[in-house]
Amino acid sequence: MALAATFILSSCHEDPLLPPGWEPEQKETVYKYPGFFLLNEGNMGSDKCTLDYYDFTDNEYQRNIYPACNPQAVHGLGDCGNDLKVYGNKLYAVVNGSNLVDIMDLATARSLAAVSIPNCRAIAFKDCYAYVSSYASEGIVDIANALGTIYKIDTTTFKTVATCTVGYQPEEMAIYGNKLFVANSGGYRYDNGDYDTRVSVIDLSTFKEVKKIEVAPNLYRMAVDRLGHIWVSSRGNYSDVPASLSVIDASSEKVIKKLDVDATGMSMAGDSLYVYGYDWKDNTTSFGIIDINTLECVSDKIIKDDTQSDIQSVYGIAVNPESRDIFITDAKDYMTPGMVYCYSREGEFKWAAITGDIPSRIAFSTIKKKK
């Protein structure tokens, strides 16, 4: 009897009687990045640049949120979106065809200001400034021979405070320390094959170009890693000079490695650089994962299942810094709504959603967007 009593008391202590219908409290998962914004480029001249949002907590994909968040904007987000970044509590959309950078509140996607920049292309940040690359061809007849410009914007006043002239048709940028690296493409000079081949280096303390680094023709994408490597892609000349990927040491400002890798798009996550390439000659897409420590390509696969055949025209790639889920956008026929595909870090398909026209840039948000 003593043993039985002991057993009963022990059982009651570990598993007390609970009221009918009681359930343990369900705690909501806390995400460092609770969602992402997706910029749909839209065809040039169609005025169909749109903004989507995906909420990880609700598993809800919302298309074309800008009009509802900004009912005063008669023409929506604008024409031909080219870049999208989160910085602080704001979202920055570079809208190339409309010659502006739209600055939105990150929690509501409500537009706070629009900075006018001619032929704007990409954006980068350091401290309280945003840097925007521009072809700077507005009002210039000889566009191909117009040098590009980097605009310096105060993120507190939304005003342009300085400009710096760089190479021809600058594209993406990367910042390491107090240096801004700019990929000059010379894309408008394709008729005679005279592409720009250099990366401009700007000293941010003086905001002056201090050097040009010879790299490869038709420079395009850029990324920076924790080791101080500046990764810059070249699209070649679409003929006898193939696409490539070069690595610049930010300290020495010298090219230390060149890989025969087509990096039409890239996304840095931890010690890995995820890339995809599109070969214009044979209309094929390639993928790769590069180790920033060895500077070598360690895999030519990102998608590990048989769903890659579902993707018609890869147009963007982004890797969630928290979960390492991989997102690939599909422009389809470039005229109708595209798709975004989500894969696990192992490359297994998870879900897909319909987007706007020509989905390109994904920006992971540090704030959950309000309904």
Image (cartoon, rainbow, N blue to C red):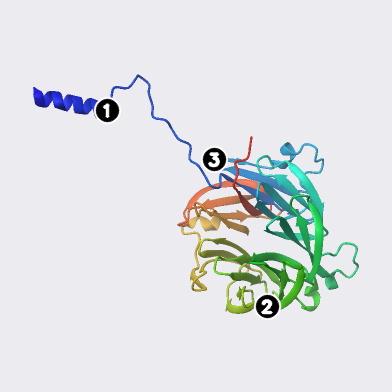
Q: Which mark is residue 15?
A: 1
User: Against 56, is 175 above or below?
Assistant: below
Q: Quadrant of the C terminus?
A: top right
Mark 2–mark 3 contact, CB under 8 Å?
A: no
User: Against 236, is 59 above or below?
Assistant: above
Mark 2 Cα shell of 10 Å, populated few (<14), some (14-19), many (≥20): many
Earlier residue among tags 2 and 3: 3
Foreground label between 2 and 1: 1
Residue 184 at least partly seen: no
Amino acid type of the residue tagged 1 in the rendering? Asp
Q: Secondary structure at mark 1?
A: loop
Q: Secondary structure at mark 3?
A: loop
Earlier residue among tags 2 and 1: 1
Q: In the image, what residue occupies the spot 73% across and 77% down? A: 211
Q: Which mark is residue 59?
A: 3
Left or right: residue 225 versus residue 106 is left
Circle 2 residue: 216
Q: Secondary structure at mark 2?
A: loop
Residue 152 at least partly seen: yes
